[in-house]
Amino acid sequence: MSSAEPSSNISMAISDSSTTTGGGGPKMMFAPFSSLISPTFWGKFDEVKVEVLQLNEDPVPICGFYAPHDMPGVNPIISVDNTSFDVTSKPHYGAIKAPGMIKTTISAEHFKAIDYNELMRNFGKSLFGEMLFSEEGLTRLAQNPTMLASFFILTYADLKKYKFLFWFGFPAISLPSVETFKVGGSTVPASEAFPNYEQDLAKRLQQQQQQESGEGGKGFFLLVKNSEGSIELKSLEQIDQIITSQTPLSNLWFGFLDTSSIDDTPSWVLRNYLAFIKLKLKLPAESEVNIFSYRPGRSATMKDVSCSYRVLFHGIEGAVDSLDTVKFVGWERNDKGAFGPKHVDAQMTMDPIKLAENSVDFNLKLMKWRLFPEFDLKMMHRTKCLIIGAGTLGCNVARCLMGWGVRHIAFADNGNVSYSNPVRQSLYNFDDCSSGGKGKAETAAASLKKIFPGIKSQAAKIMVPMPGHPISAGTVEQVKKDYDKLVELVQECDVMFLLMDTRESRWLPTVLGAKYGKIVINAALGFDSYLVMRHGMSVPGTNKRTLGCYYCTDVVAPGDSTKDRTLDQQCTVTRPGVSMIAAALAVELMASILHHPEKAMAPGNVMDSDSSLTLGFVPHSIRGFLGTGEQISPSFQAYDKCTGCSEKVLAELDQRGFDFVTDVLNSSSEYLEKLTGLDKMKEIADLAEGIIELSDDDDDF
Amino acid sequence: MTMQEGRMSYEQFTFACANFIKCPQAQIDSWRLEDESHEFGESFLSLSTIRQTSVPSSGTDADVTVCTVEESDAGKTDNSFNMKLLQYRFDVLYSVSHCVPVLYFTISETSGRLLSLDEVWTLFGLQAETDTSLWNVVSWQDHPVLHMPFLCVHPCSNWAIMKECFQGKEPTCEQFLISWLSFVGNQFGLKLSPAYLLNS
């Protein structure tokens, strides 16, 4: 026994007497109930707490179930599930319904401040104790003997965290006047106690159980040996008749369904049953009664191991039974074997966010099982994506990324949601536009969380510094701040999506992407055409890159492209579907890169690619033209005079940082052309004809 | 659609369930037929069992104060707190889209805490990601009727298994259900007694 247990005088007296007296044999031992909670119980409890109990701490009735189990040496078990809150619910086949109460405290402090002994006593009295001390109560118990198997739960629910504190009590009465002993020491198997047990009585008991099943068996019954020597099966209600018929106690067995599977140790319910027998029959001290412990086999491999006990009620001098002197015990021990509450984290069962995460992953796993065995969901979960530009492309890219199981998405955008946006930009709605419009980046990030709370989205309201958009004295501080934030975002991410609306705004992210070795995916739209591409990566340990970036095919450095444009050129002038197509291609391109054995170093043309890859080859660029229904995937080399990714530019950024950027912003395009040597190239090129011109007009995305 | 091709209709499924539950062994094992819903596809068989396990307790009570209660009582055995029990629940539903029975199950502690998929893998002694059995198509799903999370054995490969099983012979509805359940259930700790097939 645990040292945590104090001992009262009364119980000490009981313990002492067990070793010294006893007319028959050893003291009767009982196997206490263990609780078993179905996961469905907590889900239902949550509902009841919120809708019915609220802040009420008064106990409410519930029901539990006990049935024989097939594990040897295990205590009897009382289980509760989602049906427990409906006291009219019917038990499963072969199970007995036990009445119970649940008391819910409104705080953990209230739970801890409770006088547990007092609570046990109060529940013991109200559940069945009071009934044992009145004639009318004893009659009611004979009619509804399952009240002798009553239980209660003390609980506290932390519904925000889906955590529950709970403690089961199975009140058993201790009569101060008596102790019970097994006469003769051992038990008699049913087959010896009753003639022809297996062919006759066992069958009748089983039938009885089947008849009662559905209605809820009572679990208590009487066996009476009549004058012919055969055994009659009677309900406990008939006890009064039997008392008046002067049937000798030796011909009477008090039967009960014994769900303990511990040898020689009957279930806890027998304690209260014995008290009932003692008080109902008004037995004098030193009386003996027969108890029939019914333990039917549950499966073919399990035999009926019912047995008969002869029990002696040994009187204790001077002690009197009254409701005031009886004691109740029966707190359940926790997993550590100590008396104290248990707690459970039911987040798995109840948290809808957890459920959504599981379901989203499941859908993706289906793809892995069926078609795409090399799919790496964990990698998708880990990949951090930075979306620069939260317009039509940005919104659609983010949605598609979530479809692939991406959990980390950051938006960078300087704009606010305007009334023209929601119809094309799929993360915004009408309400986001009022009073000047909410910030796009934060609205998009919040919108992702609404769609899928498992997402870790963040937002940065920054203006990307752009070549040809000079810094004034008044803005220099803000530009520096935006620059620093952009550098931080780029460093934190794994994949950058450049989805802005001008050519020049892509310049700084391109340079930063190259500097920090990030995967950069770029999408740009024309009226009915699109370009989706990945930027070439440098061979590890070198500055050499094979595939080009967005600027590698350019012969002019980026400058202010908006100043000479007409209004229609500055606004959304693309066919609406173009952005959806390009956004989808951009995300699929990322998925292909991440699943390629060489990642971003994957060759950019079909000829050099491994044809066995499930996602196919990883194009360097994809250009599509809606007007002709064509799509091509050209690949081009990095250019050593590129204004975006060439060594000269990167070296300059390394050395001069923000000062270099300031120079680029404040100068005309000639500054970058001079730096990279593009100006000399242009002079030569003017002499030669035939540079293919591919249009990637940038519009508002 | 025939059962020898590995699929069954919902009517065949409910018919098989109704017969299954009448089998004396099903009563002994405490199978239940949940057919109170009259919605198409919502009848299902359910079995709850308790088992002992050697897996040590998760020890969730570490931080709980021990309470002082008068439980000194010589008449009580206290052998059970060091034995860990797990509850298993198996539900057999019908997949309308795949036209096959589907197995849903949960394993939980006595406190009602569900074991995570990783814990279930450990319980069955499996190596995650390397195993190629049906365990690879197990994942959390919303139980279609109870709307609570259950581990679901995805039915995508069911019909192929069942087609193999009957090799062109047309089984009865019950034989189909029992054969499927004994094959699939067996991998997830649901052992069906041979008594079922003898009775069918």
Image (cartoon, rainbow, N blue to C red):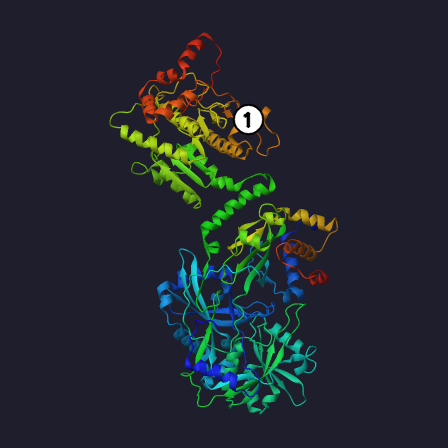
Chain containing mark 1? A
Q: Quadrant of residue A25?
A: bottom right
Q: Amino acid at mark 1?
A: Pro
Q: Total label count?
A: 1
Q: Nearer the viewer, residue A260 or A317?
A: A317
Location of residue A6 in the rendering, given as x and y in whole percent from the top left corner = 42, 75
Location of residue A42 in the rendering, given as x and y in whole percent from the top left corner = 46, 60
Check the image and report above or below for A245 versus A426: below
Quadrant assignment for the C terminus of chain A: top left
Q: Is residue A521 shown left or right of residue A571?
A: right
Check the image and report above or below for B11 versus A442: below
Where is mark 1, residue-wise?
Answer: A603
Residue at screen point 45% across, 53% down: A351
Q: Quadrant of residue A411?
A: top left
Task: Please say whether residue A76 is visible from this viewpoint.
Answer: yes
- Dot 1 alpha-carbon crowd within 10 angstroms: few under 14, some 14 to 19, many 20 or more: many
Secondary element type, mark 1 = loop
Location of residue A150 in the rendering, given as x and y in whole percent from the top left corner = 48, 74
Q: Residue furthest left?
A: A474
Q: Nearer the viewer, residue A61 or A34?
A: A34
Q: Residue furthest bottom?
A: A246
Q: Is residue A364 shown left or right of residue A612?
A: left
Q: Is residue B185 shown left or right of residue A268?
A: right
Q: Nearer the viewer, residue B20 or A640?
A: A640
